Image: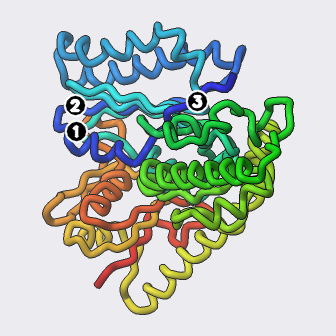
Amino acid sequence: MKTKKKLLTHDFSTLLAAHSGQPCLSLYQPTHRHHPDNQQDSLRFRHLVQELEQSLEKKYPEEKIRSLLEPFEKLETDHNFWNHTLDGIAILSAPGLFQVYNLQRQVEELTVVADSFDTKPLRRFLQSTDRFQILGLSRNEAKLYEGNRDSLDEIELASGMSFTINKALGEELTEPHQTVASYGGIGQGRNAMHHGQGGKKDELDMDTERFFRAVDQAILEHHSRPSSLPLLLAALPEHHGIFHQISKNPFLMSEGIKVHPDAIPLDELRENAWHIFKPKYQSRLTNLVEEYTLAKSKNLAFDDLQEITEAAAAGRIATLLIEADREIGGRIDAVTGKLQLSELSHPDVDDLLDDLGEMVSSKGGQVIVIPSEQMPTKTGAAAICRF
């Protein structure tokens, strides 16, 4: 049985914005999905926690340090956690807060103790242009997957969401359908059941359409809108037409996978999805670079970090591109936008590209972390202004 994962969502920034405790501890670590590779993950985690401790010792007393590190030490001995990781973990911790995220992408090892969290790796994951979701659908059940070009996992559906036809329709379900749960199902080892009376077949088809409408509404409300991720349908060919006809989801792609996910390995499902989604991914990167180039010709875009930070403080930036693998130590005055470069090893210094991204996001700007080879500038950032 596949384990469903609860993954990082966009609400992480809201959670952190509401938390003002200091110091802020950020830890990132690549992890492994399978034995025996994952046997060393907890040991590597211990070394990273020791790095946090060394940074804390520069400024805080022993009692404070022990309190801050206690939740990390408990996690180190949680064998169930280390046996069910994905490709990376991110931990953001401060007095009264200990937040752990499983990531579907490898991250570089990183420990930071500062007056704000280092969220650039999380933003890179959330704002990467290669992410998508897959809706696996049959007449009786819905399941949701999330992934990118490298990985795919079945994820938990939102709390209270009905993912089977019996739960979705309840008392409205026709009596024949209540007793024939395998009708049109996947992996049941039997064919769809047909009733002698056409009316019964029509009733079952009506149940299917009502179920699809319920699924469409729930996916849109609880998953597509919050994530803004493109959605691909994976279902038997005869279900694509019905679902696309009734769907109100603007994130649903016209292309789809004409097989139910249970019928193929997860890696094959991911490959099929990426084959469909790759042109969209490449097109978006190209459009971002072209948009920057056009804005620069009109003096509405620039790459100088001081200009960018001042524009960010004034709320002028509409779109900010950040280089994925770049870190620049420094601090930004939130009022004037003046920046001061410094060393990342200092306990009060964060990555200024990360802080810049947070500043632009807080003022309603769009922040996108893109691969280094796609960046139109050499400074680590590129800004497109509203005015």
Crowding near the residue tagged with mark 1, few <14, some 14–19, many ≥20 C-alpha atoms within 10 Å: some
Residue 247 in view here? yes
Circles 2, 1 touching at the beta carbon (< 8 Å): yes
Instruction: Give the CA distance from mark 2 to mark 1.
Output: 5 Å
Q: Quadrant of residue 165?
A: top right
Residue 63's spot in the image, x, y percent? 18, 10
Q: Which residue is at the far left? A: 335
Residue highlighted by disc 2: 23
| Dot 3 amino acid type | Lys
Which element is circle 1 on?
loop
Residue 108 in view here? no
Residue highlighted by disc 3: 4
Q: Residue 50 carries which label?
A: none
In this view, the mark in front (1 or 3) = 3
For marks 1 and 3, the one nearer the N-term is 3
For marks 2 and 3, the one nearer the N-term is 3
Residue 253's spot in the image, x, y percent? 64, 65
Is 174 on the left-hand or right-hand side of 347?
A: right
